[in-house]
Amino acid sequence: KWLERMEVGHAVVEMPGSTILHLGRGEPKPVDIEVEFRQGNKKKFLTRLRGIEEYRIDAEALSNDVSHRFACSSSVETNPVGRPALKKGRAELVFQGHLSEELTALLTGDDNLSTHGGAKGAEYNLPKSIVKVTLRKGVPARKRR
């Protein structure tokens, strides 16, 4: 009975070494991946990534890593214009192209989620349950090959 009354909690642990970085109540904070059309064009996309700082991933380093792995343009925004404000010390990463599957595969360390070879050998090992992908209005899901 007492187990049913307990609250949900989570721990962010750095491996190797099992160093606890963060203990918290409730569900862990999600990493949001959002794909939208680029302004004025229906064939080109932007992929936005938020919430990686919670897991001690450096935004600038991830941005450079993704742009090299997937040959795309990337930028780090600390003050996004026309979007919800970010907390202090947080950043939003913006990538050129429809990279939802590739980013999910890279962040979770699961090579089977993407057909792109650039996702192999990633040192990021986030659980799949915290990576949330949102496709904005009209954005098609990627076709499986």
Image (cartoon, grey):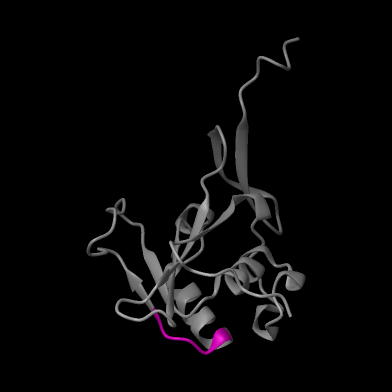
Is residue 124 positioned above or below 116 on the image? above
Instruction: State yes or no: residue 72 in magenta.
Output: yes
- Image x and y of residue 55, in percent: 53, 55
Residue farthest along the top direction in this orientation? 1
Instruction: State yes or no: residue 37 in magenta.
Output: no
The dominant secondary structure in magenta is loop
Residue drawn 73% across and 17% down?
A: 3
- Image x and y of residue 117, in percent: 70, 85
Is residue 113 positioned above or below 116 on the image? above
Which residue is nearer to you in this view: 52 or 45?
45
Query: Relative to residue 89, is residue 20 drawn left or right?
Result: right
- Image x and y of residue 10, in percent: 61, 38
Residue drawn 66% across and 78% down?
A: 119
Q: Quadrant of the N terminus?
A: top right
| Total numbered circles | 0
Span colored in magenta? 70-74
Quadrant in the rendering for residue 15: bottom right
Residue drawn 35% across and 81% down?
A: 41
Query: Relative to residue 29, is residue 104 drawn left or right?
Result: right
Query: Relative to residue 82, is residue 8 drawn left or right?
Result: right
Is residue 6 positioned above or below 131 on the image? above
Residue drawn 36% across and 62% down?
A: 91
Which residue is nearer to you in this view: 40 or 5?
40
Q: Quadrant of the C terminus?
A: bottom right
Which residue is nearer to you in this view: 145 or 120?
145
Query: Relative to residue 98, is residue 77 drawn left or right?
Result: left
- Image x and y of residue 107, in percent: 61, 66
